[in-house]
Image (cartoon, rainbow, N blue to C red):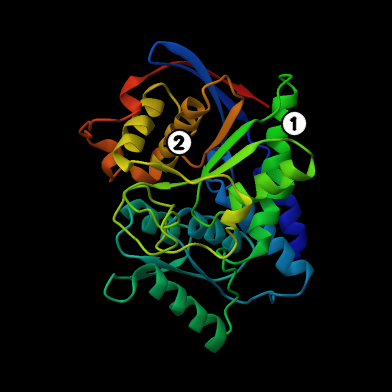
């Protein structure tokens, strides 16, 4: 079967995810946050959207050959997404990753048939991983999607995630007024922001990072250790245009972990970055001081975090937002 035909057959498994409406109390006041529930995508995360868009574009523009191997750098979800899709399309896959990520990430990629090459901090960490991938592309002629600089990443969210959010909210007689998303590549927040601007929707779109590693806030000068895997990967991605977005929101990784634990305990399987997005959205809602139609992303499920702090008791620190959140109920919007 031709690659394009395979992509067409797989299309129903990419995007068109529900919006989950989460009703909660914060310091005694009832509030609502809407979130795209991305774990039902093909390999279980929002990164399936960009993998599909990049592969489709590559075939359309003859950027990839039918049996050409693929190499990509990732902190997890994108590597899993590209491996699952590429194997379905008949490509060999090599994923370059730092060696400090959760065990489940490596195991899932290998289960799908990908080959993982781990890079230590001494070998350059994430920056070193990027250089290794570039060598595979230049010297061994691998197809290199390069999610951090590939504009198709942004276009994927501009053509799917953004429109889905708007349509789903319009069905509730609402329009998005606030959107918050953690920055791994920045494709999500850039794509949604671009789409809403084109549609004339005045929505505040904020990028999010861990306060433990304020890479964006310091212009790439300060990189710290944090536990929100999938965001703040040691540099500011090329496709993230901070001057086109609202201010950067910073959240503590421990606060994010507790929030993710609370979401899981009411039946919403989410990872740590989803907890971070919830906390960041609530933080901005409080700063605005008014009822706001607020939207964020629940990026993936909890299954890649079973060996991480998500499944351990997290100490509460002064100033945590999560401790004052009481989740009440949730419902899904198609």
Quarter of the view holding residue 53: bottom right
Residue 281: x %, y % from top left: 49, 33
Residue 210 visible in the shown view = yes
Quadrant of the snapshot with the N terminus: bottom right
Could you tell me residue 99's position as x and y percent?
Answer: 31, 64
The answer to whether marks 1 and 2 mark residues whose Cβ atoms lie closer than 8 Å is no
Query: Pointer 2: residues within 10 angstroms few (<14), some, or many (20+)?
Result: many
**Image coordinates for residue 197, horizontal then vertical, percent:** 74, 43
Count of labels in the image = 2
The residue sitting at 47% across, 38% down in the picture is 277
Q: Of label 1 and label 2, which has the lower sequence position?
A: 1
Residue on which disc 1 sits = 167
Task: Give the quadrant of residue 5.
Answer: bottom right
- Please indicate, yes or no, whether residue 12 appears anywhere in the rendered image: no
Foreground pick, 56 / 201: 201
Element under disc 1: helix
Which quarter shows the C terminus? top right
Q: Where residue 242 sits in the image (x, y, percent)?
A: 57, 55
| Residue closer to the observer: 204 or 1 | 204
Q: Which residue is drawn at 72% across and 57% down?
A: 6
The correct choice, above or below, for 87 with respect to 285 in the image is below
Residue most extreme to the bottom: 139
Horizontally, residue 250 falls left or right of residue 330, namely: left
Snapshot quadrant of residue 234: bottom left
Q: Name the residue under label 2.
A: 280
Q: Residue at x 29, y 60 (%)?
A: 100
Disc 1 and disc 2: Cα gap in Å? 23 Å
Mark 1, Cα crowd under 10 Å, few <14 / some 14-19 / many 20+, is some
Which label sits in the foreground, 1 or 2?
A: 2
- What kind of element bears circle 2? helix
Residue visible at 62% across and 67% down in the picture: 90
């Amino acid at each position: 079967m031709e690659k394009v035909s395979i992509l067409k057959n797989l299309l129903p498994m990419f995007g068109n995810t529900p919006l989950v409406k989460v009703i909660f109390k914060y310091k005694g006041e009832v509030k609502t946050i809407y979130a795209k529930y991305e774990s039902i995508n093909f390999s279980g995360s929002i990164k399936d959207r960009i993998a599909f868009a990049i592969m489709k574009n590559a075939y359309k523009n003859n950027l990839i050959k039918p049996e050409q191997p693929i190499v990509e750098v990732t902190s997890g979800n994108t590597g899993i997404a590209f491996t699952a899709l590429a194997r379905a399309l008949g490509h060999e896959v090599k994923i370059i990753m730092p060696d400090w990520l959760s065990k489940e990430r490596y195991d899932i990629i290998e289960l799908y048939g990908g080959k993982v090459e781990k890079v230590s901090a001494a070998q350059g960490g994430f920056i070193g991983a990027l250089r290794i991938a570039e060598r595979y592309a230049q010297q061994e002629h691998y197809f290199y999607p390069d999610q951090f600089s590939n504009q198709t990443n942004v276009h994927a969210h501009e053509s799917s995630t953004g429109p889905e959010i708007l349509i789903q909210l319009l069905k509730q007689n609402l329009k998005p007024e606030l959107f918050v998303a953690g920055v791994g590549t920045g494709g999500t927040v850039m794509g949604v922001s671009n789409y809403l601007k084109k549609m004339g929707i005045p929505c505040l779109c904020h990028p999010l990072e861990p306060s433990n590693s304020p890479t964006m806030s310091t212009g790439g000068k300060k990189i710290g250790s944090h536990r929100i895997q999938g965001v703040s990967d040691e540099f500011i991605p090329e496709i993230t245009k901070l001057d086109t977005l609202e201010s950067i929101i910073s959240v503590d990784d421990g606060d994010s972990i507790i929030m993710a634990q609370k979401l899981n305990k009411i039946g919403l399987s989410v990872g740590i970055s989803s907890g971070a997005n919830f906390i960041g959205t609530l933080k901005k809602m409080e700063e605005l001081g008014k009822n706001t139609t607020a939207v964020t992303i629940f990026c993936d499920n909890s299954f890649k975090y079973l060996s991480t702090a998500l499944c351990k008791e997290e100490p509460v620190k002064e100033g945590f937002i999560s401790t004052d959140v009481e989740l009440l109920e949730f419902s899904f919007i198609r």
